[in-house]
Amino acid sequence: MSGIDKTDRRLLTELQRDGRIAVVALAEKLGLSPTATTERLRRLTRDGYILGYSARLNPEKLDRGLLVFIEVKLDRTTPDVFDRFAQAVARAPEVLECHMVAGGFDYLVKTRVADMNAYRRFLAEVLLALPGVRETHTYAVMEEIKSSAALPI
C-alpha cells in the first residue's frame, strides 16, 4: 500500500463502513474539501484500490438463509481440468465464491440456498455437473459468528 497515505487509508475505512456516504460528509470526516475528497476518490478508483460499490442484502428475506461451504476435489489436477472447472463455476449464479486452495482438496465453494432441499438440488444439478468434479464435502453453517468483507487498513 505504498501508493496511498494516511488520509487515503482513513477514506477507505470510512467507505467500507458506509459506501453511500455523501462526498460532503466524507470530506468533513477527513478534514478535506469536497473537491479534494472527490479527487482522492477518483485516484483510488483509477488505481484499483476501490473496485466498486454494492449493497449488503439480507439473505433470509431473499430465501437464501442456508449458507454452505463445499470442498471440491477434481478427478485430475491438470491445467485443462482447472480451466474448465473455473470457467463453468464462474457461470453458476448460485456460487457466491470459489477459491482454488492448497491442501487436501482443490476448491472451496461458498453458496447460499433456501434450505437443505435446495442445497441437495444445487449439489446434484449444478456442482456435481461441473467438469472434473470427483468428490465433495459439505459444511452447512449452523451460525454465522462473523461475516464481513471489510479489509483491515
Image (spheres, helix red, strand yellow):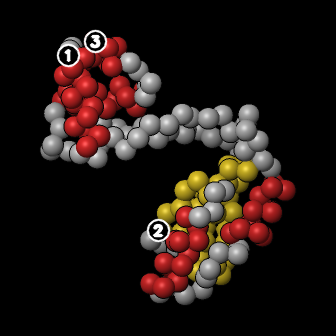
Q: Is residue 142 visible?
A: yes
Up-down: is 132 above or below 8?
A: below
Q: How many numbered tags mark residues here?
A: 3
Q: Quadrant of residue 130?
A: bottom right
Quadrant of the image containing the N terminus? top left
* Left/right of residue 138 with respect to residue 29 in the rendered view: right
Residue under the image location 73 percent in, 50 percent down:
113
Name the residue tied to disc 2: 101
Up-down: is 52 above or below 131?
A: above
Camera-nearest residue between 105 and 91: 91
Could you classify mark 2 by the number of other residues whose Cα lies within 10 Å: few (under 14), some (14-19), or many (20 or more)?
few
Inspect the image, locate mark 3, and give the three-letter code of the amino acid beneath it: Glu
Camera-nearest residue between 56 and 22: 22
Q: Quadrant of residue 135?
A: bottom right
Residue under the image location 74 percent in, 34 percent down:
61
Residue 97 at what x, y percent from top left?
55, 56
Could you classify mark 1 by the number of other residues whose Cα lies within 10 Å: few (under 14), some (14-19), or many (20 or more)?
some
Name the residue tied to disc 1: 32
Inspect the image, locate mark 1, and give the three-letter code of the amino acid beneath it: Leu
Name the residue tied to disc 3: 28
Could you classify mark 3 by the number of other residues whose Cα lies within 10 Å: few (under 14), some (14-19), or many (20 or more)?
few
Q: Quadrant of residue 142?
A: top right
Q: Earlier in the sequence, mark 2 or mark 1?
A: 1
Residue 143 at what x, y percent from top left?
67, 41
Residue under the image location 25 percent in, 17 percent down:
34
Q: As drawn, which residue projects farthest toward the right?
A: 117
Inspect the image, locate mark 2, and give the three-letter code of the amino acid beneath it: Val
Between the C-alphas of marks 3 and 2, the distance is 42 Å
Helix, strand or loop at disc 2? loop
Residue 106 at what x, y percent from top left?
52, 74
Residue 37 at what x, y percent from top left?
24, 23
Between the C-alphas of marks 2 and 1, the distance is 42 Å
